[in-house]
Image (spheres, rainbow, N blue to C red):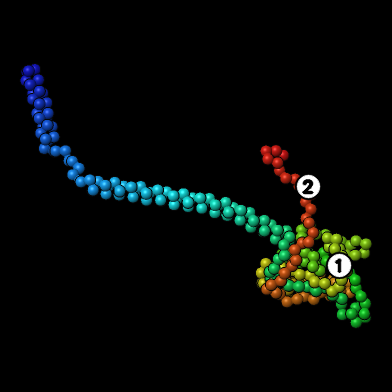
Amino acid sequence: MGNKVSFTLITLIIGFMVAVQFQTVQEPVIRDTRDIWELREAIQNERDSASNLLEELQSIDEKLDKYKTERQTSQEQALRDTLDELKQEAGLVEKTGPGLVLTVEPSLEEVLLGAKIKSVSPELLERLINELNQYGAQDISIDGHRLINTSVIRDINGETKIDGYPINTIPFEIRILTKNLKDAQDLHNRMQVSRAIEDFFIDNLSVNIGSPMESLTVPAYGDTIRIRYMEPVTEGGN
């Protein structure tokens, strides 16, 4: 029984080897039958493909460099735009937009009597400015002086001064910019019934309320803004 099993295994192995050999003989090795010119053409095609790849890589590198440059430029431009916005908000640049003009002048009675009014009280101006801000004023100038957040209106030796500049010429203009023309119209309507406007009659003054304008210019703040209690932060420290 053992001899039969061994014989069977040996027979199977020999049969498998003969089959493999027969298959190898039936499949001859495929040789490259192209002539030398065809080979040269194939080599040239490969070179062209490699050259095209190099050109594409160079183009991609150029695009990357351009993107980096544009990104850096856009960051610088963003900083410039932010700086310009901050200057506008701080009142450091001239600004144009919709708004209206109030003209402070002697009342008709004082004109008829020939009296000369030299100044307006700080309290009247402050009351009027507070009301203007309440009703949507964005930017204000008084007698050519731009008001900013730190502006001070006060009486100094009998003269009303705005940030140190005297208001001693009457009539003078108060220019107000608003967000849009509609807001200018709303402000105009509110000023018509303003209590602050009425208070000017106490000092023998009147306020002429101009019509809303699409384009009105207020000047830039003329002085240097002094920053107190602020220091630049040093790197890695306090």
Q: Which x, y percent locates residue 168?
A: 88, 69
Question: Dot 1 lies on which element?
Answer: loop
At mark 2, the secondary structure is loop
**189 left or right of 167?**
left
Image side of residue 191 versus residue 47, left or right:
right
Alpha carbon separation for disc pair 2 and 1: 31 Å
Can residue 136 be seen here? The reply is no
Using the image, determine if residue 50 lies above or below residue 107: above
Q: Position of residue 151 (x, y in %)?
A: 80, 59
The percent position of residue 31, horizontal first and vertical second, equals 18, 41
Q: Residues within 10 Å of mark 1 (few under 14, many from 20)?
A: many
Which residue sits furthest top? 2
Q: Identify the disc placed on residue 167.
A: 1
Q: Residue at x 22, y 45 (%)?
A: 36
Instruction: Identify the amino acid type marked 2.
Output: Tyr
Q: Which mark is residue 229?
A: 2
Seen as rendered, the residue at the extreme front is 36
